[in-house]
Image (cartoon, rainbow, N blue to C red):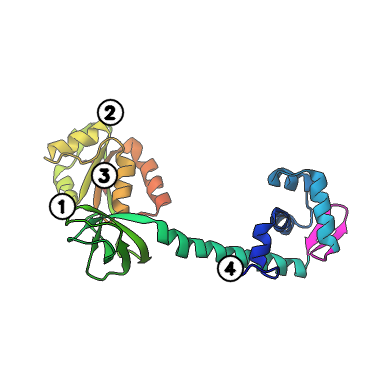
Amino acid sequence: MTQGDKDPLYTILRSKREVTRLQILVEVAEHQPAVRQQEIAAKLGVTPQAISEYIRELTDEGLVAASGRGNYEVTRTGVEWIVTNAEALEAYARHIRRDIIQQVAVWAAIAAEDVKTGDEVGVYMKGGWLYAGKKPQAAMGTVVADAKKDEDVGVARLNGIIDHHEGGIRVCKVPRIQQGGSRRVNQKRLAEVLKGSDVVAAVGLEAFIALRTAGRKPDMFYGAREGVIEAAFHGLECVIVIVDEEFTDFLKRLEGAGIGYTIHDLIAP
């Protein structure tokens, strides 16, 4: 970053006043032409008098144009000033994310083999766990301390994208006890759904008993809803057997999380 008066980033970072001017211009642009100075003052934590003085200054400099009492608009010059400073701040944020945080952040992984401090390693997902090995991968990093195979190892300076695919969730609905509970579950269909799954969860006592009857103890019961979502994010195929009164809310949670799922109605006729 060049520390010169013509550098917008240097100017705006060294002056709280310039930051405030930028914020006010953005607020004016968002709410123009009916600009409420008191609302801007409350949002920025300054007095309405200060906002009025700032707007007068911005008007004098041609960054804002007044078109009547309480009506203001950002001029073309003002828009250019906003864009210039926003681009400078965006570039600085990108520098922090890519060049600074990346250097100091340390990821925990499982050592796929014995590694030494300073080794370049490939980082990848396998079975829901993050691994680091000497084979090149889409994401590469540097080992921060010696580790033996299967030990936890720290990896810094991670570059690239970790290659992994999200798993899916098979959502199986079972009836409440008032509607017959686990006795009305089609066990043959349940056994088919369970094939090839990595994680099995139950929500509701009826769901737990249905799984136990099928000879499968669930991996999760308490906190199962969030647990299967986390497991799917890490690439595991999940089955959640859930009582029907919790079914709809859980589907909404999956939609919000953006996780792929299939629905299996286990209720026997």
Q: Which residue is mark 1?
A: 195
Which dot marks residue 1? 4
**Is residue 260 visible from the viewing direction of this image?**
no
Left or right position of 40 against 169: right
Residue 222 against residue 228 in the figure, above or below: above
Magenta-drawn segment: 61-74
Q: Earlier in the sequence, mark 1 or mark 3?
A: 1
Q: Which residue is mark 2?
A: 178
User: For the residue marked with disc 1, what is the amino acid?
Assistant: Lys
Left or right position of 70 against 224: right
User: For the residue marked with disc 2, what is the amino acid?
Assistant: Gln
Which dot marks residue 240? 3
User: For the residue marked with disc 4, what is the amino acid?
Assistant: Met
The residue lying toward the viewer, choosing from 245 and 15, is 15
- Alpha carbon distance from label 1 to label 3: 13 Å
Q: Is 66 included in the stretch rendered in magenta?
A: yes
In front of the other: label 4 or label 3? 4
- Alpha carbon distance from label 2 to label 3: 21 Å
